[in-house]
Amino acid sequence: MTDIRLPKQVIDRLEGRWRSRFGQARRRSSELFDHRLEQLRAHRNNIHRYRRLLQTQLSDLEREFIERRLSEETTAMQGLAADIPSLPSSFDRAACEEIKP
């Protein structure tokens, strides 16, 4: 097959249309993934904080409250982690580059 040479402005316009169509979906999924990771980090931090608090001297009422909150945070984190799709066992280098911030 012979090479077809197009003017730069035509190539730029085609690439712009391509990015506008397919770049938004990729960006949205990336933003959703980032949001879920932020939520997971928040739950993890809360769990660590509650576990540290349980190692201190607390009244029975305070201990009950913290144990309940710890249970709620753990359940929320497990539910959120189950929602996030796992990474494929073999993925290409380009996919890895897209994940990096």
Image (cartoon, rainbow, N blue to C red):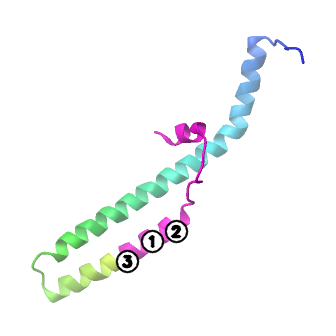
Q: Is residue 29 left or right of residue 74?
A: right
Residue, disc 3: 72
Q: Provide the secondary structure element on which disc 2 rests.
A: helix
Image coordinates of residue 29 in percent, x first then y, are 59, 50
In the rendered image, residue 77 lying in the magenta stretch gets the answer yes
In this view, the mark in front (3 or 2): 2
Q: Amino acid at mark 3?
A: Glu
Q: Rounded to the nearest whole Å, what is the CA distance between mark 3 and mark 1?
A: 10 Å
Please tell me in which quadrant of the rendered image residue 23 appears.
Answer: top right
Report the residue marked by disc 1: 78
Assign the N terminus to one quadrant of the image: top right
| For residue 58, side relative to residue 85 (left or right) | left
Q: Identify which amino acid the numbered label 1 is placed on.
A: Gln
Query: For residue 2, what is the image quadrant?
Result: top right
User: What distance separates the C-alpha of mark 3 from that of mark 2?
Assistant: 15 Å
In three-dimensional space, the C-alpha distance between marks 2 and 1, rounded to whole angstroms, equals: 6 Å
Q: Which residue is mark 2?
A: 82
Q: Is residue 59 magenta?
A: no
For this orientation, the residue located farthest to the bottom is 60
Taking 47 as reference, is 14 above or below it? above
Q: Amino acid at mark 2?
A: Ala
Q: Residue at the right extreme?
A: 1
Q: Relative to 70, is 88 above or below?
A: above
Check disc 2: other Cα within 10 Å, few if <14, some if 14-19, many if 20+: few
CB atoms at circles 2 and 1 under 8 Å apart?
A: yes
Q: Residue at image x 36%, y 73%?
A: 73
Q: Nearer the viewer, mark 3 or mark 1?
A: 1
Give the class, few, some or many, for how many residues have Cα within 10 Å of label 1's Cα (few <14, many ≥20).
Answer: few
Look at the image and give the residue range highlighted in magenta: 72-101
Q: Position of residue 5 (x, y in %)?
A: 82, 12
The first of marks 3 and 1 along the sequence is 3
